[in-house]
Image (spheres, helix red, strand yellow):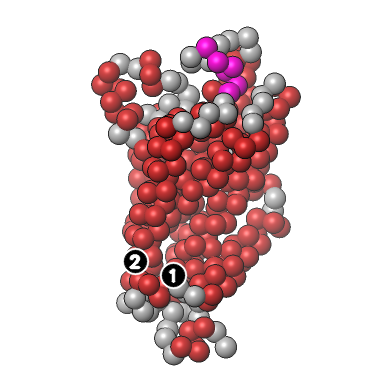
């Protein structure tokens, strides 16, 4: 008997506190996560396909980095790789909503909403699947750059990956909310590109914003992803200063706000 049958409440009902309380949510989230991971495990090449754009940047830019100094005189790999990982987080998490669109078009999503499982878990399971894929891709990227002389403190790398996981939770949740709102691929794709490209370009993942004109630097400071990029570069350099705290604060606030909005949105579906 499911948790909803035991309590006599249909899935997706109850107050906001009930949506996040009790072992039932953890169990439902784990079930949804396992279901969402099954196609990925059966087709591991999906991991490599998602890495295509960052790997292309890595292959095409690595010859230019050899023998050069970074933005502030540091090893160029220590400056370039953290930005590359943030770019991977942006695209992997940002494109997460695409996986929901075919299910909505075919009616699968509506049938899942009627299943005896928490609607919040339906969202969390998907988001955790996307974050797991993203982290696996990042680990592969780090393995690829080791032969080029890239070195990073273990503690800094772990903290950096955890920071990107938190960022990924927020971005993937927002991506699913956008997909639920527009419901059409031909609408979702341009909306996504319109949002992601400025976020990437103004975050400084490829070029240092400190060298930009005053107006462009001011725009970059309005971009929350820029603070995560700064924190990643600090962590990968073994630094634990104010930039790291700011980056974590931005990522956590984004994730909490996105999950709160996502919880309300999925609980209103079909009501």
Residue at 46 percent of width and 31 percent of height: 241
Q: Is residue 167 left or right of residue 215?
A: right
Q: Residue furthest left?
A: 215
Q: CA distance from mark 1 to mark 2?
A: 11 Å
* Residue 8 placement (x, y as % from top left): 44, 90
Question: In the rendering, which numbered label is found on residue 119?
Answer: none
Q: Are marks 1 and 2 in contact (CB under 8 Å)?
A: no
Quarter of the figure with the N terminus: bottom right
**Is 148 drawn above or below residue 258 in the view shown?**
above
Magenta-colored stretch includes residue 75: yes
* Residue 22 placement (x, y as % from top left): 49, 75
* Residue 260 placement (x, y as % from top left): 36, 60
Res. 29 in view: yes
**Mark closer to the chain start, 1 or 2:** 1
Q: Which residues are magenta?
A: 73-78
Place residue 23 in its image quadrant: bottom right
Q: Secondary structure at mark 1?
A: loop
Place residue 196 in its image quadrant: top left
* Residue underneath mark 1: 20
Q: Residue furthest right?
A: 147
């Amino acid at each position: 008997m499911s948790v909803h049958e035991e309590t006599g409440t249909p899935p997706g009902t109850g107050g906001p506190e009930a949506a996040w309380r009790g072992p039932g949510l953890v169990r439902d989230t784990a079930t949804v996560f396992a279901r969402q991971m099954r196609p990925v495990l059966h087709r591991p090449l999906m991991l490599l396909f998602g890495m295509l754009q960052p790997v292309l940047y890595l292959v095409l830019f690595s010859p230019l980095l050899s023998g050069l100094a970074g933005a502030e005189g540091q090893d160029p790999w220590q400056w370039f790789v953290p930005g590359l990982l943030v770019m991977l987080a942006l695209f992997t998490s940002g494109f997460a909503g695409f996986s929901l669109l075919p299910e909505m078009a075919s009616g699968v999503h509506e049938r899942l909403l009627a299943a005896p499982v928490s609607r919040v878990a339906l969202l969390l399971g998907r988001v955790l699947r996307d974050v797991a894929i993203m982290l696996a891709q990042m680990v592969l990227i780090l393995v690829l750059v080791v032969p080029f002389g890239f070195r990073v403190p273990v503690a800094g790398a772990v903290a950096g990956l955890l920071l990107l996981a938190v960022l990924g939770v927020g971005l993937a949740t927002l991506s699913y909310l956008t997909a639920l709102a527009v419901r059409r691929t031909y609408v979702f794709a341009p909306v996504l590109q319109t949002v992601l490209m400025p976020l990437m370009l103004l975050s400084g993942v490829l070029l240092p914003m400190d060298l930009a004109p005053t107006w462009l630097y001011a725009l970059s400071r309005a971009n929350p992803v820029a603070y995560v990029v700064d924190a990643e570069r600090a962590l990968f350099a073994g630094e634990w200063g104010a930039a790291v705290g700011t980056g974590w604060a931005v990522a956590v606030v984004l994730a909490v706000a996105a999950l709160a909005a996502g919880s309300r949105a999925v609980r209103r579906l079909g009501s």
